Image (cartoon, helix red, strand yellow):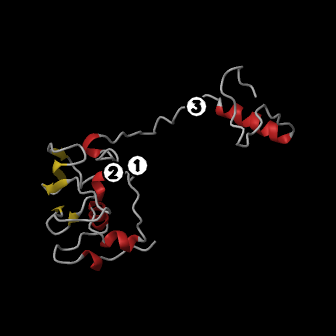
């Protein structure tokens, strides 16, 4: 062991890989050297006609920092958080409603009991659907369309909103 005298050593009950440099030679070594050299080259400037856009604020793709808001129980007919007792498949910390056809007004959420307006929530060009704190078992697109999550409402709207009297299950499901 490389441990200093008196310091803890490696656990003798476990297998340990021997540490040390592994020399790579031949064609594989040359391939690695070329890849390193290519990675260290200066970036090429973009063509002058290239436009780069930053979508932020009310136009950004992440209206909520980690996506928990999408999993609240949503009443598609009333366009607000569905009240009642729901399973752990729903995030019940939110009380929100659609406002002015595009905004989402919440009286409470995972931030606490303070009100918050999320501008242009329903009118964004795209949504970055990443979920760092939740993983739902969605079986299919049809399953997603039939659920009463807020994210289900966004998907239904993306293919054409059903009339409030029509159940979500009657919505057409796009082909994969």
Instruction: Choose between 157 and 6: the one closer to the eye.
Output: 6
Name of the residue lying farthest toward the right = 26
Whether the residues at callouts 1 and 2 have beta carbons within 8 Å, the answer is: yes
Location of mark 3 (residue): 43
Horizontally, residue 103 falls left or right of residue 130, namely left
Question: In terms of image quadrants, where is residue 171?
Answer: bottom left
Q: Is residue 28 above or below residue 162?
A: above
Q: Is residue 55 above or below residue 72?
A: above
Instruction: Choose between 126 and 132: the one closer to the eye.
Output: 132
Give the percent coordinates (x, y) of residue 144: 35, 68
Which element type, helix, strand or loop, lies under badge 1?
loop
Whether the residues at callouts 3 and 1 have beta carbons within 8 Å, the answer is: no
Which element type, helix, strand or loop, lies under badge 3?
loop
Location of mark 1 (residue): 132
Instruction: Choose between 131 and 133: the one closer to the eye.
Output: 133
Q: Which mark is residue 167?
A: none
Give the percent coordinates (x, y) of residue 74: 22, 63
Whether the residues at callouts 2 and 3 have beta carbons within 8 Å, the answer is: no
- Which quadrant holds the N terminus? top right
Looking at marks 3 and 1 on the same chain, the residue that comes earlier in the sequence is marked by 3
Instruction: Choose between 87 and 21: the one closer to the eye.
Output: 87
Looking at marks 1 and 2 on the same chain, the residue that comes earlier in the sequence is marked by 2
Q: Which mark is residue 67?
A: 2
Which element type, helix, strand or loop, lies under badge 2?
loop
Looking at marks 2 and 3 on the same chain, the residue that comes earlier in the sequence is marked by 3
């Amino acid at each position: 062991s490389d441990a200093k005298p008196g310091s803890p050593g490696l656990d003798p009950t476990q297998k340990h890989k021997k540490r040390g440099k592994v020399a790579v030679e031949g064609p594989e070594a040359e391939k690695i050297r070329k890849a390193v050299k290519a990675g260290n080259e200066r970036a090429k400037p973009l063509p002058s006609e290239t436009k780069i856009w930053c979508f932020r604020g009310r136009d950004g793709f992440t209206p909520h920092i980690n996506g928990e808001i999408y999993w609240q129980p949503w009443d598609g007919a009333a366009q607000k958080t569905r009240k009642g007792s729901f399973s752990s498949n729903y995030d019940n910390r939110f009380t929100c409603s659609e406002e002015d056809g595009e905004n989402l007004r919440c009286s409470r959420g995972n931030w606490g009991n303070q009100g918050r307006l999320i501008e242009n929530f329903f009118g964004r060009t795209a949504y970055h659907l990443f979920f760092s704190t939740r993983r739902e078992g969605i079986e299919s697109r049809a399953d997603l369309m039939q659920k009463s999550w807020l994210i289900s409402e966004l998907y239904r709207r993306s293919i054409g909103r059903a009339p409030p009297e029509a159940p979500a299950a009657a919505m057409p499901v796009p082909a994969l």
